[in-house]
Amino acid sequence: MALYYLMKVISRIFCLLPLKAGMLFGDLLGRLSLLFVPRWRMKMAVANIEECLGISGAEAEKAARQSVVKFGRMIVEVLRFPLLNKDNIDEYVKIDGLRYLEEANARGKGVIIATAHFGNWELLGAMIALKGYDMLSIARKQNNGAMDRFINECRQMVGQTVAYNRGKEGVLSMGRYLKEKKFLGILFDQDTNDTGVRLALFGKPCITPAGAAYHTPPGPAVFSRTFGCAVLPVFMHYDSDGSCRAKIYPPLYAEKTPDKERDLYQLTEQLIKILETEIRSNPPMWFWVHDRWKDGRQHFGSKN
């Protein structure tokens, strides 16, 4: 558990630093992390950006590097979570489309916050919770137990409840939250290996979670269809002045017809199209070094 206590000390240090100094350290951390990203992942990221966005190799390489550097700032922002509270969250995050969140909540059927590995998704969850909404965030259990404990404590200190994305207990927690008309936060851009909704992201086939089984990561569509709750696409951006901005889209709803597969496909397809729009508008905000299409190591790993 030495790592856990070390992270607590590091968090304390970053909380004592002025915000501007912390962000400079975050930028430095992100640039240093470029040295540790496997070469095959960087090559994969550049190739995917070129293919998906139709931009030049130089532009794609710049976007890939910025995507990694941005992660350093995200880490520092999480380390500074002890400073966040309901009275100052608006100073850290501006919100576009708050009315959509309020309207979805007013229906009284629960709300799914559907986001991606885009911008600072951890800060997005903190913002929702600190705005006064009872928030259950779905997370992947970290391989390192000390880091898992530390990250979950960061989430909990800003008002979030955490459930893991695999296992019967996690899925039951999600269903219970929606039945109680609360908020559920889901990252819908992860791959589910062999289950989920099969469709294309930027024309490249992939699988997106549907949330229909205990052993698979949950997705928004099946919960919306089951509970009638709103699916609210939300994405966190960094503005040109360095501030954070949450962009909230109008709510989506899954139909409930005799054709369940069609219902799940249609809502998931809408989410994917919104994700594509967000990525095109600000490519470095997405975490490109993640092997989203599960073919990166096959195509680039053997060359390193």
Image (cartoon, grey):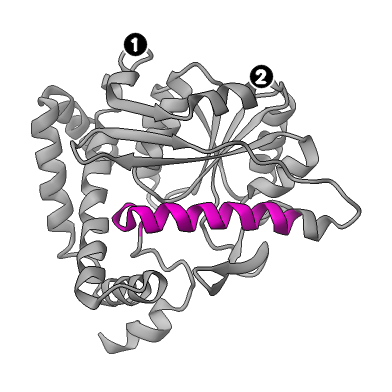
Which residue shows up at 13% across the image and 56% down it? 31
Left/right placement of residue 271 relative to residue 50 reads: right
Considering only vertical position in the picture, is 5 above or below 116?
A: above
x and y percent of residue 193 in the render? 59, 68
Judge depth for marks 1 and 2 and give the one in front. Answer: 2
Q: Is residue 285 visible?
A: yes
**Amino acid residing under circle 2:** Ala
The C terminus: image quadrant: bottom left
The N terminus: image quadrant: top left
Q: Which residue is mark 2?
A: 106
The answer to which of 80 and 64 lies nearer the viewer is: 64
Left/right placement of residue 268 relative to residue 298 reads: right
x and y percent of residue 246 in the render? 40, 34
**Amino acid residing under circle 1:** Asp
Residue 43: name its quadrant: bottom left
Q: Using a 10 Å C-alpha cutoff, classify the residue at mark 1 as few (fewer than 14 neighbours), some (14 to 19) or many (20 or more).
A: few
Q: Which residue is mark 1?
A: 87
